[in-house]
Image: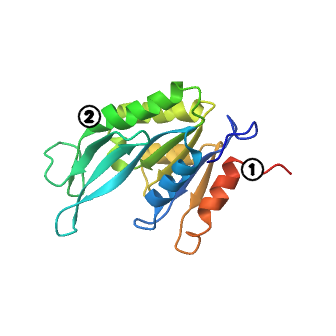
């Protein structure tokens, strides 16, 4: 567990992890969240696979264990990304609620988001919660899709963010580097 220090609590920058699909962003953010517990709140997404192993959707999982289907090939909704229908109400009820709890909980110093991407950005409440998180004294650690989106471009352009790219070459070392960045050793 990483304990927040005076140098990490409320300090900037927010850390945004990007990388190609399938490189391991969700695995990395889950490892970061585990190391920052119990000082972290937020959510990550997991792939949902059918009996044959084909991906058929995505599930939201909060750091305190709440789960709900975010998107599925069989979900009928006007909000679509590729072949997936997106349940914006699930995003609001689970992911946004987890961020809101983290924003008001005094013991939480890190807000974890996996991920800031088209599916999640259908939720206006999520965009507003992200804006509050970026303005709060808490530190946002999030994964970010590489493709362009107006909200993502606004976040990337902020002075108080650092963009970290996860690649196969740095996958084994990036966790330690990120943890050092949020909780630097005294010199």
Q: Give the residue drawn at x 20%, y 57%.
A: 83
Q: Relative to 107, is 56 above or below?
A: below
Query: What residue occupies the far right of the structure in this picture?
Result: 187
Q: Position of residue 65 (x, y in %)?
A: 38, 41
Residue on which the image places disc 1: 184
User: What x and y, as percent, mark residue 53?
Assistant: 22, 68
Q: Nearer the viewer, residue 154 or 87?
A: 87
Q: Would residue 146 be seen by someone viewing this image from the given angle?
A: no
* Mark nearer the N terminus (1 vs 2): 2
The answer to whether residue 183 is left or right of residue 34 is right
Q: SS of the residue at dot 2? A: helix
Residue toward you, 15 or 184: 184
Disc 1 crowd rating (10 Å Cα; few below 14, some 14-19, many 20+) is some
Spatial CA span between label 1 and label 2: 38 Å
The label number, if any, that marks residue 89 in the structure image? 2
Q: Nearer the viewer, residue 121 or 3?
A: 3
């Amino acid at each position: 567990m990483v304990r927040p220090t005076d140098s990490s609590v409320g300090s900037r920058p927010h850390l945004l992890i990007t990388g190609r699909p399938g490189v391991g962003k969700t695995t990395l953010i889950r490892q970061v969240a585990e190391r920052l517990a119990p000082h972290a709140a937020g959510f990550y997404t997991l792939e949902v696979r059918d009996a044959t192993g084909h991906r058929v959707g995505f599930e939201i999982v909060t750091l305190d264990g709440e789960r709900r289907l975010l998107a599925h090939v069989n979900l009928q909704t006007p909000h679509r990304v590729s072949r997936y229908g997106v349940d914006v109400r699930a995003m609001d009820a689970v992911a946004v609620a987890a961020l809101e709890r983290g924003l008001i909980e005094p013991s939480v110093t890190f807000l974890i988001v996996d991920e800031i991407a088209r599916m999640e950005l259908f939720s206006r409440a999520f965009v507003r919660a992200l804006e509050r998180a970026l303005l709060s004294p808490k530190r946002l650690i999030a994964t970010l899709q590489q493709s362009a989106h107006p909200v993502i471009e606004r976040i990337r352009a902020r002075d108080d963010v650092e963009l970290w790219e996860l690649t196969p070459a740095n996958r084994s070392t990036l966790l330690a580097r990120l943890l050092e960045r949020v909780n630097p050793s005294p010199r």
